Image (cartoon, rainbow, N blue to C red):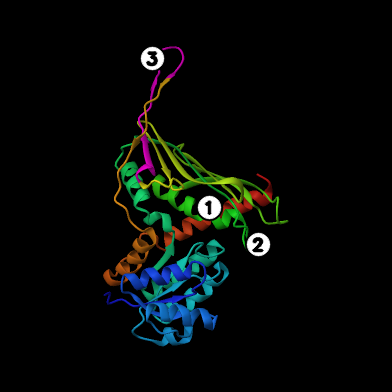
Amino acid sequence: MSDVKIAQIGCGYWGKNLARNFAEIGALGAIVDDHPATATAISAQHGVPARTLDEVLADPETQGLSFATPAETHAGLAARALAAGKHVYVEKPMALTAAECRQMIGAAAQADRVLMVGHLLQYHPIFVALRDRVHSGDLGELRYIYSNRLSLGKFRVEEDVLWSFAPHDISMILALANRPVAQVSAQAAAFVSPGIADMATCQIGFGDGLRAHVFTSWSHPFKEQRLVVVGSTGMAVFEDSQPDWDRKLALYRHQIDTSGPVPIPESVPAEYVAVPRGEPLKDECREFVAAIAQGRAARTDGAEGLAVIDVLERASQAIKAGH
């Protein structure tokens, strides 16, 4: 059982999964939900009380609050929680503007509390293995990164596909690149709901020539979740939509012969990397609890969340400007 107790705020589609994982690691202390029937059901399921937000804010035995609420509420709710001395986890996106993110970071620093953002794929064992290989230089000098996050639906009207899908991919790309963003451009189209983009691409440039792009769509004939990293000595593919865990991470050691007048590629079969199985959301919940217990920043802290929102904000501005 964990000595750190977390109140789960919002127990809808995703919040109920957070509640389950906090309960399974022994850290769930209370449930808060605006719908009494939902709160009662989830609290009974995990054997913890259903309470109001004011009650958990005033409870000295509740150290952290996990918010799975609409993104437009994150900044205000985080401010209340931090002012009450609570550690804060918010689902992605961290907030709707970089300015709101900076306010949240400032409030967390002033209160000396953990501020963590739910960029789930940073805690996926496959991505962790890929990130470690990239940072160790196993793929050589990074040249290009791209990510596809595509499916048929779920369509939304409160946010576009870029803000709904791309935070995960931008978070992973920034973690792999590990260097400042120099430029952002983007294009989008709304085919289903007027004014709500259901297809978008975002291009990210880094100062040393590294390039990346993200392709997101709700209007795709099939589901695809693929991250490709191209380096000077190797290429890697993280395919999360691959049902076989043991084939989710593939390495390619293709060579290019440049000794002649025309470069000639020499392809080799994929090498699949064995990675121990794990549940990303459980590891994410463990990270929040561990950061609180150890008095340290979380892997996906406020600064990391701000970096992602900054790219999204610049991409949205580029879409509005038409470039």
Residue 6 vertical position relative to residue 227 in the rendered view, above or below: below
Residue of label 1 = 166
Q: Amino acid at mark 1?
A: Ala
Towards the viewer: 13 or 186: 13
Alpha-carbon span between mark 2 and mark 3: 54 Å
Instruction: Give x and y (percent) for residue 154.
Output: 59, 57
Alpha-carbon span between mark 1 and mark 3: 40 Å
Judged from the image, the secondary structure of the residue bearing numbered disc 2 is: loop
Judged from the image, the secondary structure of the residue bearing numbered disc 1 is: helix
Q: Amino acid at mark 3?
A: Ser
Closer to the chain start, of discs 2 and 3, is 2
Instruction: Give x and y (percent) for residue 201.
Output: 59, 45
Left or right: residue 253 versus residue 214 is left
Alpha-carbon span between mark 2 and mark 1: 16 Å
The reply to whether residue 193 is visible in this rendering is yes
Circle 3 residues within 10 Å: few <14, some 14–19, many ≥20: few
Circle 1 residues within 10 Å: few <14, some 14–19, many ≥20: many
- Which circle, 1 or 3, is nearer the viewer? 1
Residue at 36% in and 66% down: 285
Indicate the quadrant containing the C terminus: top left, top right, bottom left or bottom right: top right
Residue 106 included in the magenta stretch of the image: no
Residue at 27% in and 77% down: 3
Q: Amino acid at mark 2?
A: Val
Residue 323 vertical position relative to residue 109 in the rendered view, above or below: above
Q: In the rendering, which numbered label is found on residue 76?
A: none
Residue of label 3 = 259
Instruction: Give x and y (percent) for residue 278.
Output: 33, 56
Residue of label 2 = 157
The reply to whether residue 114 is visible in this rendering is no
Classify residue 45 by image quadrant.
bottom left
Magenta part of the protein: which range?
246-264
